[in-house]
């Protein structure tokens, strides 16, 4: 089902939180798989120098001849940097550790904050007919993350169900506000998704209550549970939907994909 709120071309969503270990890459990979499962074509852009999204989608290091580094900083053809994965309707722009120097290399470029925006809007992109582009951001509010935000229509924020979870959001929201003022006035919050949630744990319940009290409808109804299958699947280089399709984690990511699509339909 097409997304009626999506502008011409793919809808671009950054998965961002400057705090590490909150489930950004896991959410990117599995949301991509869930969207593909319901008929959408998805491009994952790995913008994290650790390259975990690339590894998690089965892209070996020797396959990463051209990466997001070249996409940002070199005049490279999209067909050379976009790789098919072994999963139907999911492609990727992979990353390697080379990306860790990108901040230094970007600083002298006059268009340094708009390079990803322009790269993802090359005329060639129309040939791929992607419905969604999901950007896996690094765990920091650096120039790479700013590039992602300026390139995106919206931000999806994974929020780990742990103590102090909400405290880190304030800086992220300030950065989003600055990006709206300086480069992308239409940027909006796609939603906050609670990750590693344990319904038996009082702390998880308290974090959820605090998040809903403070953020209201911005918080997705779907919660991603703490699930061993979700943790195991990256070591097998596949989304949990492919690793164990009936696991609680796989079911939750399917629900998140449906909720995201339904929310956009309702906004239209």
Image (cartoon, helix red, strand yellow):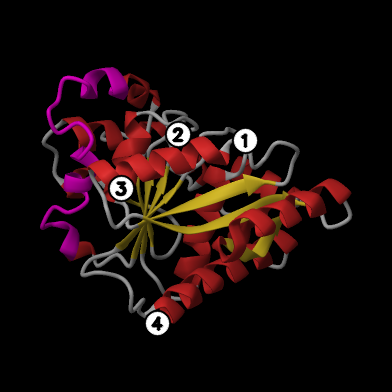
Mark 3 neighbour density, 10 Å: few (under 14) some (14–19) many (20 or more): some
Q: CA distance from mark 2 to mark 3?
A: 20 Å
Mark 3 sits on what residue?
A: 180
- Residue at x-position 48% and y-position 45%: 58
Q: Indicate the secondary structure of the residue bearing disc 4.
A: loop
Asked whether 198 falls inside the magenta stretch, the response is no
Left-right relation of 127 to 228: left
Instruction: Give the mark nearer the N terminus: 1 vs 3.
Output: 1
Instruction: Give the mark nearer the N terminus: 4 vs 1.
Output: 4
Does residue 100 appear anywhere in the picture?
Answer: yes
Q: Indicate the secondary structure of the residue bearing disc 1.
A: loop
Mark 1 sits on what residue?
A: 21
Mark 2 sits on what residue?
A: 138
Tag on residue 1? 4
* Picture coordinates of residue 104, whole percent (x, y): 27, 17
Q: Which residues are magenta?
A: 102-126
* Picture coordinates of residue 118, whole percent (x, y): 16, 46
Instruction: Give the mark nearer the N terminus: 3 vs 4.
Output: 4
Q: Indicate the secondary structure of the residue bearing disc 3.
A: helix
Left-right relation of 262 to 246: left
């Amino acid at each position: 089902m097409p997304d009626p709120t999506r502008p011409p071309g793919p809808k671009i969503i950054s998965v961002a939180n400057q705090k590490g270990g909150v489930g950004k890459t896991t959410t990117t990979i599995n949301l991509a798989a869930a969207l593909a499962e319901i008929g959408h074509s998805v491009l994952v852009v790995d913008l994290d120098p650790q390259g975990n999204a690339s590894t998690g989608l089965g892209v070996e290091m020797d396959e990463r001849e051209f990466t997001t580094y070249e996409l940002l900083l070199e005049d490279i053809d999209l067909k050379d940097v976009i790789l098919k994965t072994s999963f139907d309707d999911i492609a990727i722009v992979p990353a390697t550790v080379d990306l860790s120097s990108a901040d230094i290399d970007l600083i002298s470029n006059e268009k340094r904050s708009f390079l990803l925006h322009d790269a993802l809007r090359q005329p060639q992109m129309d040939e791929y007919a992607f419905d969604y582009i999901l950007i896996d951001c690094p765990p920091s509010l650096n120039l790479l993350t700013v590039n992602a935000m300026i390139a995106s229509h919206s931000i999806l924020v994974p929020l780990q169900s742990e103590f102090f979870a909400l405290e880190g959001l304030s800086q992220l929201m300030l950065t989003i506000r600055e990006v709206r003022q300086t480069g992308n006035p239409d940027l909006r919050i796609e939603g906050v998704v609670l990750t590693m949630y344990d319904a038996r744990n009082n702390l998880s319940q308290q974090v959820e209550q605090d998040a809903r009290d403070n953020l209201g409808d911005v918080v997705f109804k779907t919660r991603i549970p703490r699930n061993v299958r979700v943790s195991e699947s990256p070591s097998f280089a596949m989304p949990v939907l492919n690793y164990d399709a009936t696991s609680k984690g796989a079911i939750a990511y399917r629900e998140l994909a449906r909720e995201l699509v339904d929310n956009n339909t309702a906004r239209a």
